[in-house]
Image: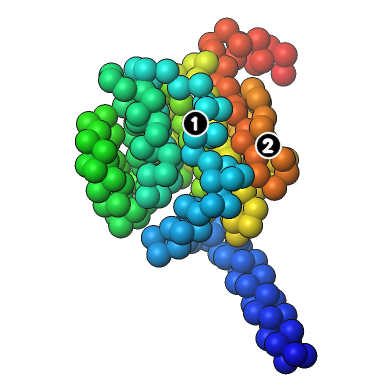
Amino acid sequence: MRIVFLDIAVLLLLLVGVSLWWRGAVRLRFLPCPIWLGWFLENPYMEAVAGSSTIINRLHLTPGMQVLDVGCGMGRLTIPAAERVMPKGVVVALDGQPTMLEEVKKRVAAKHLTNVQTVLSRIDQDELEKGVFDRALLVTVLGEIPDREAALRHIFSALKPGSLLSITEVIPDPHYQPHHVVCRLAEAAGFQLDSQHGTWFAFTLNFKKPDELQNEVLKQAT
């Protein structure tokens, strides 16, 4: 029995060590969650603490909206978002891994959706068209991005004034970003906290891009 406990302890220490290494390594290299770990995001635990319908409801989507799903993975949020904004709304599913986007395309085809566009891109490296999106999503993705500051600046630029960025973080994601870090990074990019949901281990923070008048007031105040 003692040997079993020792084996479990060693395994836990190994997992913690790998997680800590991965958290540090993503600041230097692009090391996203590979497709074979997709089960980590699509399982009963994730559905209970950060289910796709729960996150989508927090976005207040309406038909006709333009949505950016950053780090879309296999499309867990892409599909329900696309269904909410039909018939004229569009969801842009952006990911840096071709294998993830291929899975999104399969799921979109299976649902017979025609309002999803897939984009192979690194959000921290590539700027998007300015002022076109009503909503942007980052679900357990922020910590995977090497240059988080640049990524949030690019998203800020791509959103329309008055629109929302929704960031969700969940433990035990090895890239988990705590509440105060998310707020600091988002506010540094120009966002204002609009609403918050959940608890410290599974939360969603919605940030608003101020309209032009608000921006002028903020600049004068500082």
Expressed as whole percent of the image width and height from the top left, the position of residue 115 reads 26, 29
Query: Callout 2, which amino acid?
Result: Gly
- Residue linked to disc 1: 56
- The circle on residue 198 is 2
Tag 2 secondary structure: strand
- Label 2 crowd (10 A; few <14 / some 14-19 / many >=20): some
| Kind of residue at disc 1 | Ile
Q: Which quadrant would residue 189 be assigned to in this image?
A: top right
Q: Does 95 sit left or right of 24 as displayed?
A: left
Tell me which residue sits at (52%, 16%) in the image: 162
Q: Position of residue 72 (x, y in %)?
A: 41, 44
Task: Determine whether label 1 and label 2 are within 8 Å by CB.
Answer: no
Rendered position, 219 above or below 129: above
Q: Position of residue 174 (x, y in %)?
A: 60, 59
- How many residues crowd mark 1 within 10 Å: few (<14), some (14–19), many (20+)? some
Identify the residue at horizontal 67%, vertical 30% (top origin). 196
Relative placement, left or right, of 71 versus 114 is: right
Q: Could you say which quadrant of the image residue 49 lies in?
A: top right
